[in-house]
Amino acid sequence: MTENRIQTRRIAVIGGGPAGLMAAETARAAGASVDVYERMGSVGRKFLIAGKGGLNLTHSDPFERFVSRYRGRERELRAWLEKFDADALREWARGLGVETFVGTSGRVFPGDLKAAPLLRGWVRRLRASGVDFHVHQRWLGWNDDGALRFEHAGETRRVDADAVVLALGGGSWPVLGSDGAWTRILEDRAVDLAPLRPANCGFEIARAGAEGWSEFFANKYAGQPIKPVVIEWRGANGATIHRQGEFVVSAHGVEGSLIYAFSAELRDAIAAQGSATIHLDLAPGRDAARLARELAQPRGKRTLSEHLRRHAGIDGVKTGLLYELLAKDAMQDADRLARAIKALPLTLVRPRPLAEAISTAGGVRFAALDDALMLKALPGVFCAGEMIDWEAPTGGYLLTACFASGKIAGASAARWAAR
């Protein structure tokens, strides 16, 4: 491939997700010249997909509770959010003409629930401010004299920059550009990285000595939600967590919002112990003793499925789950069946692959960064977003921290470039 030289620009932002775009906006507002380089054909692809069912922009939690969502990284993320928190993000959206509202769950959404109008307005404003966009640019790292290298249309391009912001995402959803290829580039430059792992992910299950659902159950129920349901899980520290919501039966196991809420703890427990067992309360609000009395009533000519529907409020996929996980004799014993309805054990044996996860744990360790989010091993190179080693549950916490880190990295890069 030939190598063409491109005119020097002040700041190169590599990655066109929320963190990269916020870094570009902040650096441009500080007076720097900014170019955004994006591997895909347009920016914000994952942002658009994440908002397809309603863009959960942030959360209305009080600040201290908000910070507590970043398990193990509360101190570092507090520093980010003190500079740009949920209220600041809502005000920023208002500046783009997008009003937000708080849903019943405390999550914050745009008034029309859509991601596309916000992204379009943002990109228009960035272009109008002088930010230049370059798409179909695969970052290859640096050449021997420190210039950036990009592959575009079969050619290798050289770009000189006074400062660089890396906002390359994690390793989930590679079809949208976040394939984790940057890890090899940074490892070659002696940057300390934590291995990329799935976060907010589904899990594969095991039952009665076999892995996965039976063919009959998977074919009949995959894609169906289980709701309402309470998950109980006892962590390594002995603390028991209860949470109510819903999840979805997948072809391989379970996924969905309630599973994602536990996913970090479950993933780590599986890595340490080989499996993790959760217990499902399929009849929240119903007393086990009363369930046993109701189920002990004569069935007559009714099927067990009809008996469960009438006396326990259990039907559809919940009934299928009981048949799938309980022995036949337990299904015929009212007391054992009632106990199972209130605490049905489900064993998880592995998280689904990183490419399927909503987000990524691992990445550039905080010890490799200074307070300005500059890589200690690479002066003038700053990091933002999901490629840094932190994680958060769904609910707007992920996006908020990406925006906040982009704000810090963009301002820091502008200061560096002005030196």
Image (tube, helix red, strand yellow):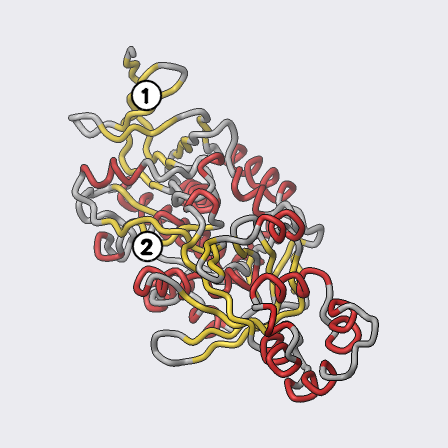
Above or below residue 399? Residue 315 is below
Residue 282 x %, y %: 64, 72
Residue 81 makes an appearance in the image: yes
Residue 144 x %, y %: 16, 26
Above or below residue 324? Residue 47 is above
What residue does disc 2 label? 389
Residue 287 x %, y %: 66, 86
Q: In this view, does 392 lie to the left or right of 56?
A: left
Type of amino acid under label 1: Gln
| Mark 1: few/some/many CA within 10 Å (<14, 14-19, 20+) | few
Residue 29 makes an appearance in the image: no
At 77% from the left and 71% from the top, the residue drawn is 309
What residue does disc 1 label? 7
Residue 108 x %, y %: 61, 61
In the image shown, does 232 or 216 lie closer to the viewer? 216
Q: How many labels does the image show?
A: 2
> SS of the residue at dot 2?
loop
In the image shown, does 176 or 225 lie closer to the viewer? 225
At 26% from the left and 48% from the top, the residue drawn is 374
Q: Which is nearer the N-term, disc 1 or disc 2?
A: 1
Q: Do the residues labelled 1 and 2 touch (CB within 8 Å)?
A: no
Quadrant holding the N terminus: top left
In the image shown, does 270 or 411 lie closer to the viewer? 270
Of all residues shown, which one is farthest toward the top?
2
At 65% from the left and 62% from the top, the residue drawn is 226
Q: Is residue 195 left or right of residue 202?
A: left
Q: Which of marks 1 and 2 is in front?
A: 2
The image quadrant of residue 155 is top left
Q: In this view, does 3 lie to the left or right of 211?
A: left
Of all residues shown, which one is farthest toward the right?
301
Type of amino acid under label 2: Asp
